[in-house]
Amino acid sequence: MNILVLGCGKKERPGNPDDNVITIDINDNVGADFVHNLDIYPWPVEENYFDIIWLDNVLEHLDNIIRSMEEIHRVAKPNASVTIIVPYFRSIWASLDPTHKHFFTVDTLSYFIDGHIYHDRYAYSKVKYKLLNKEFNKYIDKSWFRRLVLPWANKYPNFYETYFSHLYPMEDLTYELEVLK
């Protein structure tokens, strides 16, 4: 498996020991394979090369979401898996960090989902993804109260966002996508 980890930082890398994991980060102190500003295109990796692409709290730091999603699409193989973790717009973590440039709702990435009304109506980009899953707080430890609310919020994310997220905001969103080529 060829795995690309964007904005790797010092976090644990996904994959198995025999996977080919390539990392990119702007910080030259984290041991990334490539030190590169992800706002500069193209990224220094091959086209149609990666089976898995992982962005853990990275996309909110980049200048251009549309261009970034197009670049992810460019370097991914057909049917590649893309995991994107971002702070939820109602979370304190979304606006706490002064380097965050974007905020994410349950439908922010729908502009790239094949067949979604936002993608079809606005056509900001020609790249297409299939939504496999979107989930609040997938990798975050859950308090007892959050464990009660979370299954319901994940089952009805738009209803939760519209009517309850201001009362009890989740911390982050994980989008799992498949690249369509």
Image: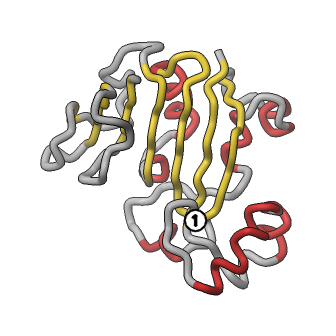
Relative placement, left or right, of 52 versus 17 is: right
**Residue identified by numbered label 1:** 137
Of the pair 28 and 52, the residue shown nearer to us: 52
Residue 160: x, y in percent? 79, 70
Residue 78: x, y in percent? 58, 16
Picture residue at 85% right of the left edge, 66% below the top: 159
> Type of residue at label 1?
Asn
Secondary structure beneath label 1: loop
Bin the neighbour count of mark 1 within 10 Å (Cα to Cα): few under 14, some 14-19, many 20 and up: many
Above or below residue 86? Residue 71 is above
Q: Quadrant of the C terminus?
A: top right
Of the pair 70 and 133, the residue shown nearer to us: 133
Asked where in the image residue 31 lies, by quadrant, the reply is top left
Asked where in the image residue 73 lies, by quadrant, the reply is top right
Relative placement, left or right, of 93 versus 129 is: left
Picture residue at 85% right of the left edge, 33% below the top: 121
Picture colour scheme: secondary structure
Q: Quadrant of the N terminus?
A: top left
Residue 84: x, y in percent? 53, 45
Relative placement, left or right, of 164 versus 138 is: right
Of the pair 52 and 128, the residue shown nearer to us: 52
Residue 5: x, y in percent? 36, 38
